[in-house]
Amino acid sequence: MPMPTPAAVRSKIRRSYDDRPYPAADESVLTNPGCKIAPLEWIDALSRPGRESVQPRRILVAGCGTGSEAFSLRRRVPSAGIVAVDFSPRSISIALRLAQRAPEMRGIRFVVADLASPRLAATIGRGFDFISCHGVLSYVPEPERALGNLARCLTPDGALYLGVNGSTHPSVGWRQALSGFGIDVENFRDTRRLREILRACDAISFHDSQSRLSTESAAHLAGDLFGACIHNLPLTEWLRVARVAGLSLCGSYSCGHSLGPLCRRSLTRVLMPRSRAEFCELEEMLIPASFHRLLFMRKPPANPPWDDVDALLAWCPIRTRLHHTALPLRGRSWHALRPVRYRSTAPGTRIDLRIPEWEAEILRESDGSRSLRDILGKIPVTIPAPLLREQLYILYLLIVIDLLPPTPVTDR
């Protein structure tokens, strides 16, 4: 039997979403985000470190369904021009109807379009500062083509957030289990027998009687568990797809939680000189993700020269706005350890460390306008080079600071 063509698979997936739009097609979509995207604070810290909170002017929601994410972004960034795209005509029709019920949402442009179409840019335009594609590319037959189209719609300094299934996504095992019961996992039919099988699998998976997938809506099951195409891929494969599209990884949303134990046990020096992106790959090797929340840009992020302290001193530290950090008042001893709490509501992390006074002073002076050499010139103590780079590296991995490369000197 010949394999179905990508066009045939796309048509089948489109019919599924036309039959069961997601999320729920009622007014709750206007008030309840219904989806978990990475917070804009985290995105800003990686893509625009330390700058004043310049909100994106143009936002693209790639795969908007019935509009939940677009409505959420309108509330967060009311001044932005938002374009929301989906290939399901019925989903777009519902989103347009819902937007008419809320005056503040009427400016969102909802468009029926296929992310893999070569005419995508002509249909929706280019020059987007921020593109969000959450829970979509895992269900697209040709993710390389779709991501390449999105990259071409991005501004040179824009950021693209991608939420995609990992190699340990629950649907991997569940689809195998359901197939063993004789269930066709490519065609969803909401029957009493299916729900009973799901309840049994819930009991086995969660070791108690609490229902999980068995109580999910038909729209959720049809889109997240059933279907003609589901890509559950390791990070390395998604990075390959991104590289083909001309995108570079800036960071993964999960990394903040892994870094806490490393920092508290003073083990970050072992990782040097890995970049944030390389740390993401290491984390994936050790703890394969079920879902990836990734941030990409068209230009590769600059990794500071951790192996060359003299060159590192020419870089300019700048504090990001990801963490709420209350620095202590200046003390009398430059080597005295001071308690500092790095708290972020974005990834939901809190790390308590004790840092020397000279490090606290570097943080106070880190506004991006002066090099490390200039800042250290005003600190009247000698700081061992290995200790300096180790402490800075911790701040860099935590996204407490970023380090901006020196501005090239041009001949006049």
Image: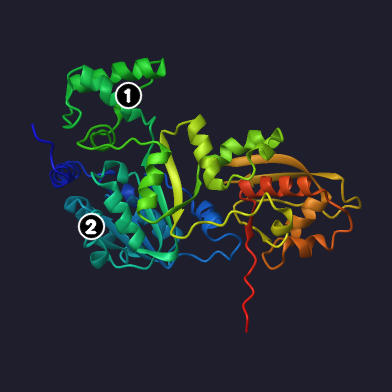
Asked whether residue 67 appears in the rendered view, the answer is no
Residue 274 sits in quarter: top right
Find residue 189 and report its horizontal and vertical position in percent. 16, 29
Location of residue 364 with respect to 34 vertically, above or below: below
Q: Amino acid at mark 2?
A: Arg
Find residue 233 and report its horizontal and vertical position in percent. 36, 36
Q: Is residue 155 left or right of residue 273?
A: left
Q: Residue at x 41, y 45 (%)?
A: 239
Residue 158 sits in quarter: bottom left
Find residue 393 and report its horizontal and vertical position in percent. 67, 47
Find residue 141 and report its horizontal and vertical position in percent. 23, 44
In the foreground, 257 or 345:
257
Q: Amino acid at mark 1?
A: Gly
Q: Which residue is mark 2?
A: 97
Q: Which residue is mark 1?
A: 173
Which element is circle 1 on? helix
Which element is circle 2 on? helix
Q: Quadrant of the N terminus?
A: top left
Considering every residue shown, the one lying at the far right of the view is 332
Location of residue 173 with respect to 301 vertically, above or below: above
Label 1 Cα neighbours within 10 Å, binned few <14 / some 14-19 / many ≥20: few
Q: Residue at x 29, y 68 (%)?
A: 125
In the rendered view, how is the structure colored?
rainbow
Q: Quadrant of the C terminus?
A: bottom right
